[in-house]
Amino acid sequence: MATNILMPALSPTMEEGKLAKWLVKEGDTVKSGTILAEIETDKATMEFEAVDEGKIGKILVAEGSEGVKVNAPIAVLLEEGESADAVPAAAKAPSTGDIAGAMKDIKAAVSAETAAPAPKAAAPAAAAAPAAKADGARIFASPLAKRIASEKGVDLSILTGSGPRGRIVKSDVESAKPGAAKPAAAGAPAAAGGAGIPGVAPLPDARLLYPAGSYEETPHDSMRKAIAKRLTSAKTLIPHYYLTIDCNLDALMAVREKMNAAAPKGKDKVPAYKLSVNDFIMKASAMALMKHPDVNASWTDTAILRHKDADVGVAVALDFGLITPIIFKAQTKGLVEISNEVKTLAALAKEKKLKPNQYEGGGFSVSNLGMYGIKSFTSIINPPQSCIIAVGAGEERAVVRGGKVEISTVMTVTMSADHRVVDGGTGAKFLATLKQFIEEPASMLL
């Protein structure tokens, strides 16, 4: 029978995306693994593969469509021998009139439900409803798996799928015994609070405050919407506090110059590497995190998670937004490896080709605006991390040493910390260690 192809969740936090491009057309035959479309999330553009084989009977969402909700039908897949006439009316793309009518019905239903409890409706016929678990959740299974389950008398609701995103596939049904009980699920962690911001009134639409024709509108893309939502939530729900420290860069600059001068050169005279000040800061941050595990941590509603490795994010400014790819296990990597990895990740970010596992998670981040001449600033914490450092420009300043005024290159670092996880004294000790590693790079070897 005809099966809806649903908008995939390409990352744990994805709620909607843009269907950037269809790579198949109606009538095309596809099999498992066929690339169907390119989906643009808030962070990257990713390919979407077919799970089942069949023929594209109907495309429901046109390419270029934005704000397509996860699990919304985007196309219909037909089984072998079926024609486009087999596409059920409910699966076809709604018209503008249908949408307007549906919204009207929804509003009316909500009003009625608010006024008085609605009587229970009669249960629909089993054949008309999608497969569902006892708790009402929809069961995702391939058409072949459904057919085999029907023949063997296997209840799909008792199975745990091994296919992409938990989809039940043929092998899951073939290995199941009719009437078998579903294994008890492991206790799920409590959901993080603060999905909304109760009691906060929305700001007025800025367009109401300016004369018509005095501005140009640039519609929000997926990334800008995600940045606004995530950072508003982070700033509202995380109790930030800030610590600032100055770091002398004289020794670091001297070591950097020697290391870059010693870089081997290829046939084209291009050095094998070129270390930046930020590469040293990334390494120093990783080593300081290993010295202070209480800072290398994340908050949950039931526990603090202390990370075993220093997974350090580096903020990358893009023309269309901001992203923080992560250098995993940075404490185990040398400066050259960190430098090359940062360059590779930054290039992928600018092409919107980062994968979720390259930018999600981490325990700490570095945001550096020194290259723009910014002396000091504060950053917003990137959850689930608990700290981020804002790095300013290294500049010549008057420094008193032994009663004498000397000129040194000094850099200001400001750490934003989550007070639920990192207390003030703990944060101060961490910054003192970071300062030591930056001012005496050789101490990172101890």
Image (tube, helix red, strand yellow):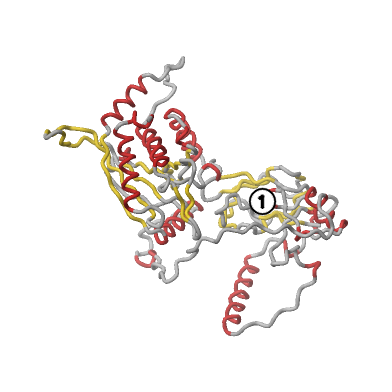
Seen at 76% across and 44% down, the residue is 31
Q: Is residue 83 above or below residue 250?
A: below
Q: Where is residue 57 in the image (x, y as percent from the top left)?
A: 76, 53
If the image is split into quadrants, where does the C terminus sit? top left
Q: As drawn, which residue projects farthest toward the bottom?
A: 116
Q: As drawn, is 428 to the left or to the right of 198?
A: left
Residue 220 seen? no
Seen at 30% across and 36% down, the residue is 436
Task: Name the residue that disc number 1 marks.
Answer: 165
Q: Is residue 86 above or below residue 347?
A: below
Q: As drawn, is 270 to the left or to the right of 251?
A: right
Q: Where is residue 33 in the image (x, y as percent from the top left)?
A: 71, 42
Q: As drawn, which residue projects farthest toward the top?
A: 267
Q: Where is residue 232 in the image (x, y as percent from the top left)?
A: 42, 59
Residue 311 seen? yes
At label 1, counting other C-alpha atoms closer than 10 Å, the crowd grade (few under 14, some 14-19, many 20 or more) is: few
Q: As drawn, is 281 to the left or to the right of 91?
A: left
Give the amino acid type for the residue marked by disc 1 in the picture: Arg
